[in-house]
């Protein structure tokens, strides 16, 4: 099955590119290239990638695994290796790993000699449906996650579900959470389809990836720099970021926090009379089918509430929540009243 999704961006210097959902094709690169990866992904799969890549010179840059290494120091490390190997402005980077590797490789590519090409070969479900699509790249620093970065679109994205055979179940489910997010926000048919298809079946998984990537590509085409509709992709995330902050990064996988966050956003939508309990229940059961958390015990609703305003997406102490009006229909809830948010949070209290 070969599927192509096109990204067509109006604003230079961005360019059109294709996202291929298929067995990894032969990748031919004219100049020098470097694969950026980590020891885990390399140990499992590098031989298969190497068999597919044809470049004038090919180097491998390995960085430690994990979100903790998504830092400026590691970007320096990557750049130093590129200079060691004398890569130049015509060279290409290949991101081989999950979203951490993708975001870092993209960022390194965006600044190496003022910007070179890069290719995404995402190896987690989350990076296949979300992180590899749309050109957001970056790193974390002590002030927070993804606060430093650039918009830098890849030259191509190659999505191959083969890699996912070695992915732990929890990581798989975390990717499913972002797929569910896309369906709840944009596509009721897709949501219904998800309710009746098991993504552990290869053909279903490919179909779900395709539909999800198509939806994300549509959003990015419309709003590359997140001035409007791209913010809808933050459904569940305003709550998720607080959950991640409170529990310490690493307790919950991002997708798991998003799952619980979507349940909370749904509760807020119900509080405002926007969303029905029946539909909220359908979202919850779909998430539970993949073992995703749909509960989170809030210790202190007041301090949970205060955390919303530390989010980089909160401006001038205003906060916008993305909520569903129905499955497949999003709405932006701008500055909901504190008392009503607290009431919703109280219901999640320990
Ligand atoms: P990750 O990159 O940390 O990967 C999760 C774990 O799975 C890692 O230990 C990784 O080494 C391992 N792994 C990768 N491929 C594997 C495979 N095939 N088999 C077994 N193990 C494998 O995490 P992630 O969930 O892929 O991505 C999360 C990151 O993506 C975050 O840093 C987040 O900020 C970023 N992100 C970016 C965007 C964007 O638009 N740029 C969107 C969503 C998320
Ligand atoms: Mg996310």
Image (spheres, rainbow, N blue to C red):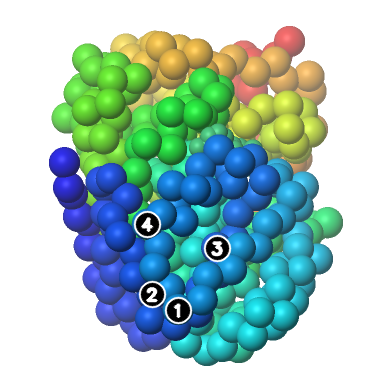
Closest to the observer: 262 or 116?
Answer: 116
Closest to the observer: 37 or 193?
Answer: 37
Q: Residues within 10 Å of mark 3 (few under 14, many from 20)?
A: many
| Residue 313, placed above or below residue 106 | above
Which residue does the image show at 72% across and 20% down from the upper left? 298
Q: Residues within 10 Å of mark 2 (few under 14, many from 20)?
A: some
Specify which label sits upstream in the sequence, 3 or 4: 3
Q: Which mark is residue 29?
A: 2
Which residue does the image show at 73% across and 27% down from the upper left? 251
Q: Residue 156: percent from the left, percent from the top?
A: 35, 65
Q: Which residue is mark 3?
A: 35
Name the secondary structure under disc 1.
strand
Left or right of 246 in this view: 203: left
Q: Residue 146: percent from the left, percent from the top?
A: 65, 58
The answer to whether the residues at label 2 and label 1 have Cβ atoms under 8 Å apart is: yes
Which residue does the image show at 44% across and 47% down from the upper left? 48
Q: Which residue is mark 4?
A: 52
Q: Residues within 10 Å of mark 4 (few under 14, many from 20)?
A: few
Q: Which residue is mark 1?
A: 56
The answer to whether the residues at label 4 and label 2 have Cβ atoms under 8 Å apart is: no
**Separation of marks 3 and 2 at Cα, in angstroms:** 12 Å
**Separation of marks 4 and 2 at Cα, in angstroms:** 11 Å
Which residue does the image show at 47% across and 87% down from the upper left? 90
**Separation of marks 1 and 4 at Cα, in angstroms:** 13 Å
| Residue 236, placed above or below residue 65 | above
Q: Does residue 308 appear in the picture of this structure? A: no
Closest to the observer: 12 or 38?
Answer: 38
Front position among marks 2 and 1: 1
């Amino acid at each position: 099955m070969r599927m192509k999704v096109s990204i067509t961006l109006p604003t230079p210097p961005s360019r059109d590119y294709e996202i291929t959902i298929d067995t990894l094709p032969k990748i031919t690169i004219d100049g020098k290239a470097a694969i950026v990866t980590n020891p885990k992904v390399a140990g499992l799969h590098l031989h298969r990638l190497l068999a597919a890549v044809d470049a004038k010179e090919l180097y491998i840059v390995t960085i430690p695994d994990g979100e903790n290494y998504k830092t400026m120091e590691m970007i320096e490390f990557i750049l130093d290796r590129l200079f060691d190997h004398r890569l130049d402005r015509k060279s290409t980077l290949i991101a081989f790993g999950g979203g951490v590797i993708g975001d870092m490789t993209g960022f390194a590519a965006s600044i190496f000699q003022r910007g070179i090409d890069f290719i995404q070969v995402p190896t987690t479900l989350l990076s296949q449906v979300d992180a590899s699509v749309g050109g957001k790249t970056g790193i974390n620093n002590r002030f927070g996650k993804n606060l430093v970065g650039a918009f830098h679109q890849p030259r191509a994205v190659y999505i191959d579900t083969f890699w996912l055979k070695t992915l732990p179940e929890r990581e798989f489910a975390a990717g499913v959470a972002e797929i569910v997010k896309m369906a709840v926000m944009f596509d009721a048919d897709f949501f219904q389809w998800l309710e009746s298809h098991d993504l552990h079946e290869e053909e279903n998984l490919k179909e779900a990836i395709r539909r999800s990537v198509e939806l994300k590509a549509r959003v990015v085409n419309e709003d590359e720099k997140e001035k409007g509709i791209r913010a809808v992709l933050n459904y569940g995330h305003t709550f998720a970021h607080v959950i991640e902050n409170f529990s310490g990064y690493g307790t919950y996988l991002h997708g798991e926090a998003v799952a619980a966050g979507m349940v909370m956003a749904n509760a807020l939508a119900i509080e405002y009379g926007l969303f029905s309990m029946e539909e909220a229940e359908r979202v919850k059961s779909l998430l539970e089918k993949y073992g995703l958390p749909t509960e989170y015990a809030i210790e202190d609703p007041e301090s949970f509430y205060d955390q919303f305003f530390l989010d980089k997406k909160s401006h001038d102490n205003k906060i916008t929540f993305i909520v569903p009006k129905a499955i497949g229909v999003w709405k932006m809830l701008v500055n909901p009243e504190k008392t009503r948010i607290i009431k919703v949070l109280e219901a999640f209290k320990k």
